[in-house]
Amino acid sequence: MTSQKGEPRLKKSIIVLAFISLGLVYSTMIVGVYFSSIEQGIACTEWPLCPNGLFGAPEERYTVEYAHRLIAAIAAAFIYATAIIVPSKIKRAKKAALIAAAIVSVQLVLGLAVVFSQLNPLLVASHLSTGVSMFALVLLTFLWTSFWRKQS
C-alpha cells in the first residue's frame, strides 16, 4: 500500500500494537493503584510469581497482585514489540518507543525492589512515577504513529 506521494504507508497493525500497549500500561497502573489502596502491596512476597507459580491459580489473597504482575508482563512484551516494529523513518515515534522499552525494563526491576524492600516509600514512589513516564512515552508513540499515518 502506498500513499499519493509513492511512499509506503504505515501499516495499521503498528498503530493497533501501540494502542494495545497503551491500554495495557494504563490497565497495569489502575490495577496497581487498586491493590495498593486495599493494602495488598506485599500480599505476595515472591517475585515474579506468587507461590502457586505461573500455571497454578493464585490464592484469593494474591489475585490482585498476580493480575498486576501478569498484565505488566504482557504490557512489557507489547512495548518491546512496538519498539521493534515502529519504522525508523518515524523518528519521534521510534525514539519514544525505544525509550519506553528501556523504561519498562527499569520498571520491572523497580517492581522487584518494591516487593523485596517490603514497600519502601522511596521505591514505591519511583515505581509509580516511572509508570507515569512510561505511559506518557507509549502515548506519544501511539499519537506519533497515528499522526504520521494520516499525513502519508
Image (spheres, rainbow, N blue to C red):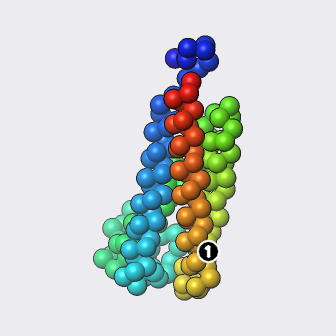
| Residue lying at 65% horizontally and 64% vertically, measured from the top left | 106
Q: Quadrant of residue 10?
A: top right
Q: Position of residue 133 (x, y in %)?
A: 59, 61
Mark 1 neighbour class, 10 Å CA radius: few under 14, some 14 to 19, many 20 or more: some
Hey, which quadrant is residue 107 in on the image? bottom right
Instruction: Reply above or below: 80 against 69.
Output: above
Instruction: Give whichever of 14, 90 is nearer the camera.
Output: 90
From what the image shows, is residue 54 above or below residue 138?
A: below
| Picture coordinates of residue 140, whole percent (x, y) | 57, 48
Q: Quadrant of residue 125?
A: bottom right
Query: Which residue bears the numbered disc 1?
Result: 126
Name which residue lies at 61% across and 13% down.
6
Q: Is residue 1 visible?
A: yes
Decide: is 26 above or below 115.
above
- Residue sitting at the far left: 60
78 lies left or right of 100:
left
Q: Locate the C terminus by quadrant.
A: top right
Q: Is residue 66 visible?
A: no
Could you say which is closer to the camera, residue 5 or residue 25?
Answer: 5
Q: Disc 1 marks which amino acid?
A: Ser
Residue 124 position within the rendered picture, expressed as x and y whole percent measured from the top left: 56, 79
Q: How many marks?
A: 1
What residue appears at the point 69 percent right and 38 percent down from the top-left corner? 91
Q: Position of residue 32 (x, y in %)?
A: 44, 71
Q: Secondary structure at mark 1?
A: helix
* Image height of 135 relative to 129, above or below: above
- Give the residue at x 59% y 53%: 137
